[in-house]
Amino acid sequence: MKVKIKEKSLIAKMAAWYMGSKNIAIVFGKTIHLHGVNKNEFMAVEQWVNHELVHVRQYQRYGFFTFLAIYAIESLRKGYYNNRFEVEARIGETTGEKITIH
């Protein structure tokens, strides 16, 4: 799987503000957007990388806009933590997949 990492992302900065977090990773399609953490720091935390890779696979499974819509509905109904996509990503933190970072 080819994945791009974007450091100092405005999207991630906005997500960090919304979530009240100093550092964050957020996925859109095949790009992991980072704020408050650089690529090397992010890549050093295997569980965090695996979590975000689950989201990349979810985008692939549902398609970009469908995933965003379903994710938003899930979050509104169940909250961020109980959102089925976040539950799946937390489970996936302990499994790995070979990736190519650009």
Image (cartoon, grey):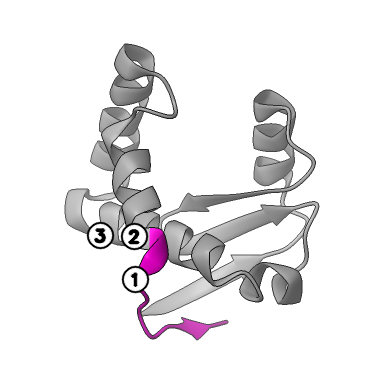
The Cα atoms of the two marked residues, 3 and 2, are separated by: 16 Å
**What residue is pinned by disc 3?**
60
In the image, 98 versus 73, the foreground residue is 98
Which corner quadrant holds the C terminus?
bottom right
Marks 3/2 in contact by CB < 8 Å: the verdict is no
Which of the 4 image quadrants contains residue 8?
bottom right
Which residue is located at x 34 percent, y 60 percent?
Answer: 92
Q: Is residue 95 magenta?
A: yes
The Cα atoms of the two marked residues, 1 and 3, are separated by: 18 Å
For mark 3, does the 10 Å Cα neighbourhood hold few (<14), some (14 to 19), or many (20 or more) residues?
few
Marks 1/3 in contact by CB < 8 Å: the verdict is no
Which residue is located at x 33 percent, y 32 percent?
Answer: 71
**What residue is pinned by disc 1?**
95
> Left or right of 79: which side holds 78?
left
Amino acid under disc 3: Gln
Residue 41 is situated, as x and y percent measured from the top left of the image, at: 74, 70
Which residue is located at x 44 percent, y 66 percent?
Answer: 50
In the image, 65 versus 1, the foreground residue is 1
Marks 1/2 in contact by CB < 8 Å: the verdict is yes
Q: Secondary structure at mark 3?
A: helix
Which residue is located at x 72 percent, y 52 percent?
Answer: 9
Question: Most extreme residue toward the top, as rendered?
Answer: 77
In the image, 14 versus 47, the foreground residue is 47
Amino acid under disc 2: Gly
Q: Can you say whether 72 is above or below 44 in the image? A: above
**What residue is pinned by disc 2?**
92
The Cα atoms of the two marked residues, 1 and 2, are separated by: 5 Å
- Of circles 1 and 3, the one toward us is 1
Tell me the magenta residue range. 93-102
Which corner quadrant holds the N terminus?
bottom left
